[in-house]
C-alpha cells in the first residue's frame, strides 16, 4: 500500500524502509567515530571521559567557524580536518595539565574532573557562539543526491556510509601493524607490564587521548552539513556513545562499529515501528544485551575485581563518642536555623537536606558496595511519584504519602537490582543507566497516569509544614534518622559483608557470603532512602516531573559523593552541601554559572584528589604521624641521654669502686705483712 507524503510524491513501504535504513547508516558513521574514540581512551587510560561529548560539540563549532572563513572544496575539507586537529590539541593540553595530576586518584574522580570540563565547555560555547542554532554549509560537490531504489539518497550520506568502514580498517591497521598500536593494545590488557618494559606511559596516554579526541571532533565536524550545531548536542551524543561502547564491548573498535549501526538503525526505525517506546528503545536493547551477554558483543569477561572504588581511601571507622556529641550539637544548631534565617534560605536549606539523603544513599552503593550507579535518580523520581500518587489519587495525609514514596522506590530498586547486581564496573553502571532511562520514558510517555511532560501538580504540604520553617523542621526530622540508619547499616555485620563482596568476590563467597543477595539488599536500601528524598522533594516543589529522574540528576548525585569523598562518614553530606549551595548561589549571581562551577569542581579535584573529607582525613593522618614521630624522637632523645648519663655515672661509680677495692687490697697486704713480721718476731 503506497504512502502519500505530498501531492507529487508517493512512497511505498519498501522505499520508506530503504530510506530510513540509509539514513541510519549515515548517522552511524559519526556515532562510530565518537564511540571508538571513547572506547580507545577508556581501554588504555581507564578514564570514563564524560567530556568526550564536549569535544564532539567543539569539533562542530570550530568547524562551522572555519568553514565560514574558508571557501571552496579544499577550504571546506581542510576546515573539517583543522577543526579536529585544533580540538585534539586542546585535548592534549587537558590531559597534560589536568588528567596527569589525577591518574593516581580513583577512576571515578577522573569522571568528576571531566564532568567539570563539560560544564565549562557548555558555557564557553554559549559565550563564544551564542545560544542560537548554527546551520553549516553544504559539502562542496556533495550537495546533490543519487537515485537508489527509486528514491533520492543524499550524496553526503553515501560519503558518510563509506567513511565508517574506511575508518574501521585504518584503526585496525594502526593498532595491529604499528609499534605504537601494539603498545596501546598491550597497555589496554596490562599497563603494569608495559611500565616494567620501560615504556613512557605518560606520552603513550597523551597520544591515545589525542587520538580519541580527534575522532570525537571529526565526528562532530562531519555533522555540520547534516544537522544544525547547537549547545546541547554534547549530552545526547555522549549517552549514545556510552551505549555503543558497552553494547560493542569495551576496547573493541569492531564492536563499536557494529553497535553504532545497531543504535543508529534503532533510532531511525523506532519512530516508525515503535512510536510509543522510541525514546527508550536503545536502552531496552542495551539492557537485554547486558543481561544476556554482560561484556558486550566483542568484549571479554572481566575477572573478579580485587579492589573497588571504596577501597582506595584509608579504611574508615564509625564516629566515636566525642564526634557523636559534636554531631548532635551540629544537628541542634541546624534545628535552630529557622529562628535566624529567612524564608528563601530555609527553602534552600530544605533542598540541601533532601539531597544529602540522595547522596548518602548513592554513597552506600558506591563506597560500601563498590557499585557506581549512573541511574540512581530513577529511585529519587519514583519516590516523588509515589508520594504524588498517594496524595492526589488516594488523598492520603502528607506524612503517609511521604512514606509511600520509599515503598515505590524500593519496589523499583528490587526489580532493577535483581538484574544489575549480576554485573560489575562500567557494565553495572550502564545497566542502571538503561533502566533509569526506561523508567524516565514511562513517566514521560504515560500521560494518562503521570501527566507526561506536564507533570503532577498541586502536591502541597499539610498545615504544620506549609511554612518554610515548618517544612525545614519536618525535613530535618526525616533526614537525621535516615542518615543515622545508613551509618548503622554501614558499620553493621551486613555492612562488613557488603564490603567483603566489594574487596574480593571470590574470598567473600568462599566464606559463605552470597554476593548477589547482599548487593541486592544494599541496592534496595539505597533506593528506598533515595525515594524518601524524592518524596520530600515533591512536597517541597509542589509538583513532580519526569526531569526528577533524568540523567543530569544522577550525575549530580555522583558529583556530590565524589566531591565529598568516598570511604568517609561525612563525605556525602559535605559533598551535597557544597555542590548544591554552590550551584544555587552561582545561578543567582552569574549567567555563566556552569563555567564557574566547572572551574570550582576541577580546582577541588586537584586540591582534594580523594574528595574534601577524604583529603582532610589524609592531612590529619599525616599531621598525627608527624606529631607521633616527634614524640617518638623526643622519647628516643631522652632515652639516649639517660643511657649516656647512666654510662657516665656507671663509669664514675666503677672508678670509685675500683679505687676503693685497690685501697682495701693495699690495706689487706699491709695487714698481712704486719702479721708476718709479728710472727717472725
Image: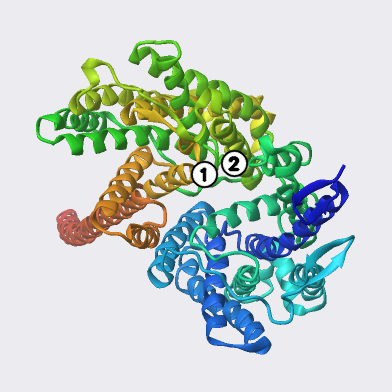
Q: In the displayed structure, would residue 469 be above or below residue 42? A: above
The foreground one among 421 and 127 is 127
Q: Is residue 247 visible?
A: yes
Q: Position of residue 20 (x, y in %)?
A: 78, 53
User: In which quadrant will I find the C terminus?
Assistant: bottom left
Q: Position of residue 645 (x, y in %)?
A: 19, 59
Mark-to-mark CA distance, 2 and 1: 8 Å
Q: In the displayed structure, would residue 420 be above or below residue 410? A: below
Which residue is at 30% across, 31% downward?
A: 320
Furthest toward the right, the residue is: 149
Label of residue 433 in the image: 2
Label of residue 397 in the image: none
Res 396 quadrant in image:
top left
Circle 1 — which element?
helix
In this rendering, position of residue 220 left or right of residue 108:
right
Q: How many marks?
A: 2
Residues at badges 2 and 1 in contact (C-beta under 8 Å)? Answer: yes
Which residue is at 45% across, 42% downward?
A: 553
**In this figure, which residue is indicated by the disc labeled 1?**
551
Res 176 quadrant in image:
bottom right
User: In which quadrant will I find the N terminus?
Assistant: top right
The foreground one among 6 and 641 is 6
Q: In the displayed structure, would residue 488 be above or below residue 254? A: above
Sort mark 1 into few (<14), some (14-19) or many (20+) by Cα contacts within 10 Å: many
Circle 2 — which element?
helix
Sort mark 2 into few (<14), some (14-19) or many (20+) by Cα contacts within 10 Å: many
Amino acid at each position: 500500500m503506497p504512502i502519500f507524503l505530498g501531492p507529487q510524491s508517493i512512497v511505498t513501504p519498501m522505499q520508506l524502509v530503504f530510506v530510513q535504513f540509509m539514513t541510519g547508516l549515515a548517522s552511524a558513521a559519526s556515532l562510530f567515530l565518537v564511540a571508538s574514540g571513547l572506547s580507545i581512551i577508556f581501554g588504555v587510560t581507564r578514564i570514563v571521559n564524560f567530556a568526550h561529548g564536549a569535544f564532539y560539540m567543539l569539533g562542530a563549532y570550530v568547524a562551522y567557524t572555519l568553514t565560514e572563513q574558508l571557501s571552496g572544496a579544499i577550504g571546506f575539507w581542510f576546515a573539517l580536518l583543522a577543526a579536529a586537529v585544533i580540538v585534539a590539541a586542546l585535548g592534549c593540553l587537558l590531559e597534560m595539565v589536568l588528567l596527569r595530576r589525577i591518574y593516581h586518584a580513583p577512576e571515578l574522580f577522573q569522571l568528576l574532573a571531566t564532568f567539570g570540563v563539560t560544564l565549562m565547555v557548555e558555557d564557553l560555547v554559549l559565550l563564544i557562539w551564542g545560544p542560537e542554532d548554527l546551520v553549516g554549509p553544504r559539502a562542496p560537490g556533495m550537495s546533490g543526491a543519487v537515485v537508489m531504489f527509486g528514491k533520492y539518497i543524499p550524496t553526503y550520506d553515501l560519503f558518510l556510509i563509506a567513511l565508517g568502514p574506511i575508518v574501521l580498517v585504518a584503526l585496525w591497521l594502526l593498532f595491529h601493524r604499528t609499534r605504537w598500536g601494539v603498545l596501546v593494545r598491550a597497555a589496554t590488557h596490562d599497563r603494569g607490564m608495559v611500565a616494567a618494559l620501560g615504556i613512557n606511559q605518560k606520552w603513550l596516554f597523551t597520544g591515545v587521548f589525542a587520538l580519541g579526541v580527534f575522532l570525537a571532533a571529526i565526528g562532530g565536524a562531519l555533522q555540520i552539513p547534516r544537522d544544525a550545531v547547537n549547545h546541547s548536542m554534547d549530552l545526547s551524543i555522549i549517552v549514545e556513545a556510552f551505549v555503543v561502547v558497552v553494547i560493542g564491548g569495551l576496547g573493541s573498535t569492531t564492536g563499536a562499529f557494529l553497535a553504532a549501526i545497531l543504535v543508529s538503525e534503532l533510532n531511525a526505525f523506532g519512530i516508525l515501528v515503535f512510536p510509543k517506546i522510541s525514546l527508550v528503545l536503545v536502552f531496552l536493547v542495551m539492557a537485554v544485551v547486558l543481561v544476556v551477554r554482560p561484556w558486550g558483543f566483542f568484549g571479554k569477561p572481566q575477572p573478579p575485581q580485587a579492589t573497588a572504588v571504596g577501597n582506595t581511601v584509608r579504611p574508615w571507622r564509625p564516629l566515636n563518642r566525642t564526634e557523636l556529641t559534636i554531631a548532635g550539637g551540629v544537628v541542634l544548631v541546624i534545628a535552630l536555623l529557622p529562628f535566624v534565617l529567612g524564608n528563601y534560605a530555609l527553602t534552600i536549606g530544605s533542598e540541601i537536606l533532601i539531597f544529602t539523603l540522595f547522596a548518602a544513599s548513592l554513597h552506600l552503593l558506591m563506597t560500601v558496595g563498590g557499585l557506581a550507579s549512573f541511574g540512581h535518580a530513577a529511585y529519587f523520581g519514583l519516590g516523588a511519584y509515589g508520594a504524588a500518587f498517594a496524595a492526589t489519587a488516594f488523598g492520603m495525609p502528607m506524612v503517609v504519602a511521604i512514606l509511600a514514596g520509599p515503598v515505590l522506590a524500593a519496589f523499583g530498586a528490587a526489580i532493577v537490582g535483581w538484574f544489575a547486581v549480576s554485573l560489575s564496573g562500567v557494565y553495572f553502571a550502564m545497566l542502571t543507566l538503561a533502566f533509569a532511562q526506561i523508567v524516565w520514558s514511562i513517566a514521560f510517555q504515560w500521560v494518562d497516569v503521570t501527566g507526561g511532560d506536564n507533570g503532577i501538580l498541586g502536591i502541597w504540604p499539610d498545615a504544620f509544614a506549609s511554612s518554610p520553617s515548618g517544612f525545614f523542621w519536618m525535613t530535618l526530622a526525616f533526614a537525621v534518622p535516615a542518615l543515622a540508619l545508613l551509618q548503622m547499616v554501614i558499620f553493621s555485620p551486613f555492612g562488613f559483608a557488603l564490603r567483603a563482596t566489594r574487596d574480593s568476590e571470590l574470598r567473600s563467597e568462599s566464606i559463605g557470603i552470597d554476593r548477589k543477595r547482599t548487593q541486592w539488599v544494599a541496592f534496595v536500601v539505597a533506593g528506598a532512602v533515595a525515594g524518601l528524598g524524592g518524596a520530600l522533594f515533591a512536597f517541597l516543589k509542589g509538583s513532580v516531573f519526569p526531569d526528577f529522574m533524568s540523567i543530569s540528576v544522577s550525575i549530580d548525585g555522583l558529583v556530590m559523593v565524589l566531591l565529598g569523598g568516598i570511604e568517609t562518614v561525612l563525605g556525602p553530606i559535605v559533598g551535597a552541601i557544597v555542590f548544591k549551595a554552590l550551584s544555587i548561589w552561582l545561578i543567582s549571581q552569574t549567567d555563566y554559572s556552569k563555567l564557574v562551577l566547572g572551574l570550582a569542581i576541577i580546582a577541588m579535584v586537584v586540591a582534594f584528589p580523594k574528595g574534601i573529607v577524604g583529603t582532610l582525613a589524609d592531612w590529619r593522618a599525616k599531621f598525627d604521624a608527624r606529631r607521633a614521630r616527634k614524640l617518638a624522637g623526643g622519647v628516643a632523645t631522652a632515652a639516649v641521654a639517660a643511657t649516656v648519663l647512666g654510662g657516665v655515672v656507671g663509669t664514675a661509680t666503677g672508678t670509685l669502686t675500683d679505687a676503693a677495692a685497690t685501697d682495701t687490697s693495699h690495706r689487706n697486704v699491709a695487714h698481712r705483712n704486719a702479721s708476718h713480721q709479728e710472727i717472725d718476731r
